[in-house]
Image (cartoon, rainbow, N blue to C red):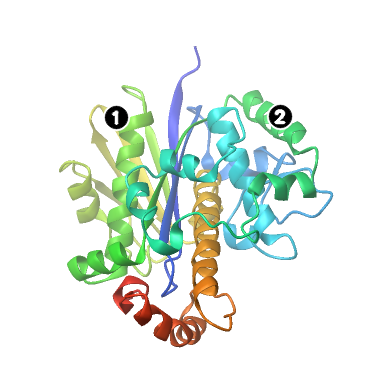
Amino acid sequence: MQQTKLQVGIDEAGYGPRMGPLTIGATAWRVPVPFDADDMTKLLEPEFLSKPIQSQSTHVPIGDSKKIHRDKLAVEGLVLGAWFLCYAANRAVPADWDSQMAAFAFQDWNRISKVPWYVPLTSPRQSHWIERLDGLISDYPAYFGAAITKLNSHAISLAGIRMRVIDEIEFNQQISRTGNKSTLLSECSLELAREMVREFSKPGESIEIYCDKHGGRNRYQSLLTFTFDEAWFEIEMEGRECSRYSALWRDRSVRIQFKVDGDSIFPSASASILAKWTRESLMERFNGFWQANVQGGIASTAGYYVDALRFAEQIETTAMRLGLHRDKWWRKK
């Protein structure tokens, strides 16, 4: 029987904005032991490509979400990549986004679903994801199947998906505790990585964890040691481009790296797609809530600082009327 290892990818969306949630995605892939994650994207072409989709595309877009979420079909590209990952994990395309998120982000979803601007919209502008795909590419189930066949041909399987979704209120509370968002991102990402290893790895199986760099942080040893139950992580390298560590944790060999453009490596690229898909979905609800409540209408925002200032000024009177203090919808960092 072929020996396997677990490759875990972690990535975020919404680190920079001042409005909307911080979302962190995680995927766990079971692959043959000799397999190099850096070669995975090339190996899986042309069924998987790190580029946006067009109306006649037949590839699954898996890559840095900033490169997928562009051009005319930006949102649809995210949807297609994310829904394939859901399909690969469950062998079925999910019919309901909220129930899927409740499964992936169970640690946060009960809290998130009670935030006024993240509850499901009844407005027609919140079109169903499956309708977007059916209207765009009618035969996507066929090449979902082709993509699965390609994974199977290399003995690669998606072991699991998990998410963290940090809404604005929770974000501000955590910033008050940590003092900065880089530490918040690192703590949440590493806790998620630990849980992925706990849930999806097999006894004795080696683990590789791939992350993008967290802000300007170069040193992660103390955070790793604290998160992984005081296991001692040896420093393999630390620097601006890449920091890499290794440890023995619960009979498992664990190696973790934080790399510039780390979200281009297939496991973390998959996590990037899920994180961006989740944030975009929630931002659609966020904008819909305020557009339904602000008299005279208001243009949507992506939540980045300059435009967020414009949006904040336009909603402030309405927010006061609704009893929604600024700390509930404006992030401190």
Q: Position of residue 224 (x, y in %)?
A: 24, 50
Give the percent coordinates (x, y) of residue 246.
Answer: 30, 43
In the picture, the disc for residue 145 is: 2
In this rendering, is residue 198 above or below 73? above
Disc 2 from disc 1: Cα separation: 33 Å
Q: Which residue is mark 1?
A: 252
Residue at (75, 41) in percent of width and height: 46
Going 54% across and 75% down the picture, which residue do you hit? Answer: 301
- 70 or 319: nearer the viewer: 319
Residue 17 locus on image (x, y percent):
44, 73
Label 2 element class: helix
Percent x, y of residue 69: 64, 61
Q: Is residue 225 visible?
A: yes
As drawn, is 249 to the left or to the right of 118?
left
Instruction: Mark 2 or mark 1: name the one nearer the start of the chain.
Output: 2
**Under tag 1, what secondary structure?**
strand
| Residue 18, quarter of picture | bottom left
Q: Is residue 184 left or right of residue 231?
A: right
